[in-house]
Image: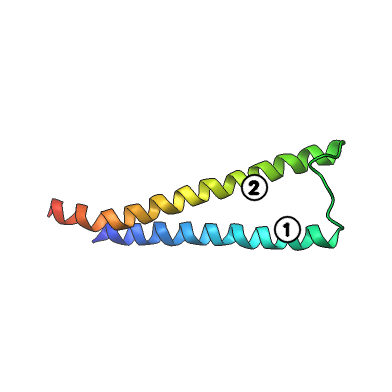
Amino acid sequence: MRRNRYSIAYFGLSLAALLSWVVMFLAGTDVWHDVGRPDFWHLQGPPYHDLRTFGYAFYLLLIVLSVHTILAARGLRIAPTQDRKTD
């Protein structure tokens, strides 16, 4: 039973992280629209290299969090059957 509790907490934290990413995306979109939609993907200069790196890492984080949430859901589904086998 303890393993199932950990699986639920693991899945809940994964969902919270994914929802936090969505909030950051929505807030960033609002800021981007407010400053006039700068095209930092094609601009040159010191701050724009950092912004591009941030953009790549931000969208890579979505992939990592999505896989993490899927694996947590899979573990939540598998955990009760494993506990019954060991009893």
Residue visible at 64% across and 47% down in the picture: 58
Q: Which residue is mark 1?
A: 28
Q: Position of residue 33 (x, y in %)?
A: 81, 61
The answer to whether residue 63 is left or right of residue 50 is left
Q: Quadrant of residue 24?
A: bottom right
Total marks placed: 2
Labels 1 & 2 near each other (Cβ < 8 A): yes
Q: Hey, which residue is sitting farthest left in the picture?
A: 87
Which label sits on residue 58? 2
The answer to whether residue 62 is left or right of residue 45 is left
Residue visible at 86% across and 58% down in the picture: 35
User: Mark 1 Cα within 10 Å, few/some/many (few <14, many 20+)?
Assistant: few
Q: Position of residue 44 (x, y in %)?
A: 86, 36
- Mark 1 to mark 2 CA distance (whole Å): 11 Å
Identify the mark nearer the N-term, 1 or 2.
Answer: 1
Residue visible at 75% across and 41% down in the picture: 52
Residue 81 drawn above or below residue 56:
below
Q: Position of residue 83 (x, y in %)?
A: 19, 55
Q: Secondary structure at mark 2?
A: helix
Quarter of the image with the C terminus is bottom left
